[in-house]
Image (cartoon, rainbow, N blue to C red):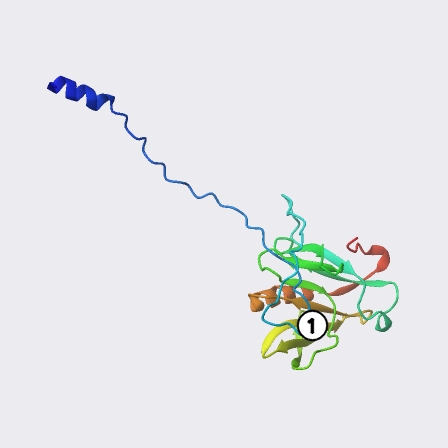
């Protein structure tokens, strides 16, 4: 084989195309935001309920949206009034929890849920820590429910500044507990009353 033949073979040998380095494309992770199963009597084999569906963000979201609902203590509230809280729609989505109750689901903290509710029957071994703290203009009675020293959920009870309604909320969580509570308390600090005729509750 002559040098010319060798050169010709080398030219005809297919060359592998340069490998392309994959480019990372940012994606938006669907975050779980369902209420965990009731904490009473939970064992190490705990199973969470399916995730909630949150309304997707629109292109031009307002800075704050409102959530209106019936107060949980109807007998202690004046008839014809709903509660109203304001929330950042980029952090929270209006939805219903797994029990059909209206709720806010956190968009970035899985299983972080803010819903109307209060402390109900506790199982043996459950402890409740009581506190009173000011959030915004209101003072809330705060009950932290623990099992084996681990926080399970927190309830917040308050009367609006105009003393028209008395209501409570429950915050459920799994991970990032402090961040979940901090964002929930920012919502609760906006609690006011509103005439039922002006309310727009979750259908």
Quadrant in which residue 156 is drawn: bottom right
Foreground pick, 61 / 22? 22
- Residue 143 horizontal side relative to residue 16, left or right: right
On the image, the x and y values in percent for residue 73 come to: 81, 71
User: Where does the image place residue 13, in percent across and percent down from the top left?
Assistant: 25, 24
Identify whether 25 is placed above or below 155: above
Classify residue 68 by image quadrant.
bottom right
Residue 139 sits in which quadrant? bottom right
Which of these two is toward me, 195 or 18? 18
- 34 vs 75, left or right, is left
In the depicted structure, whether residue 1 falls above or below residue 60: above
Asked whether residue 189 is in view, the answer is no
Position of the N terminus by quadrant: top left
Can residue 119 be seen in the rendering of this structure? yes
Counting labels gives: 1
Foreground residue among 18 and 49: 49
Q: Outermost residue, right direction?
A: 79
x, y percentage for residue 11? 22, 22
Circle 1 sits in a helix, a strand or a loop, which is it? strand
Category of crowding for the residue at label 1, using alpha-carbon neighbours closer than 10 angstroms: few (below 14), some (14–19), many (at least 20)? many
> Could you tell me which residue is drawn at 58 percent across and 79 percent down?
149
Could you tell me which residue is drawn at 71 percent across and 78 percent down? 122
Image location (x, y in percent) of residue 107: 61, 55
What residue would you read off at disc 1? 155
Q: Is residue 43 left or right of residue 101?
A: left
């Amino acid at each position: 084989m002559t040098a010319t033949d060798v050169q010709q073979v080398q030219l005809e040998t297919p060359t592998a195309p340069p490998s392309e380095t994959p480019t990372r494309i940012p994606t938006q992770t669907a975050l779980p935001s369902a209420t965990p199963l009731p904490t009473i009597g939970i064992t190490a084999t705990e199973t969470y309920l399916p995730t909630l569906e949150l309304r997707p963000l629109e292109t031009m979201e307002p800075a704050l949206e409102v959530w209106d609902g019936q107060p949980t203590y109807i007998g202690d509230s004046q008839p014809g009034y709903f509660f109203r809280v304001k929330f950042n729609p980029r952090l929270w989505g209006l939805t219903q929890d797994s029990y059909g109750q209206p709720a806010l689901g956190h968009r970035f903290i899985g299983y972080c849920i803010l819903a109307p509710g209060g402390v109900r029957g506790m199982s043996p071994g459950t402890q409740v820590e009581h506190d009173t703290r000011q959030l915004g203009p209101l003072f809330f009675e705060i009950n932290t429910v623990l099992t084996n020293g681990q926080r399970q959920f927190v309830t917040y009870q308050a009367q609006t500044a105009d003393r028209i309604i008395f209501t409570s909320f429950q915050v459920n969580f799994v991970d990032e507990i402090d961040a979940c509570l901090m964002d929930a308390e920012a919502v609760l600090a906006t609690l006011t009353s509103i005439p039922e005729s002006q309310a727009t509750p979750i259908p």
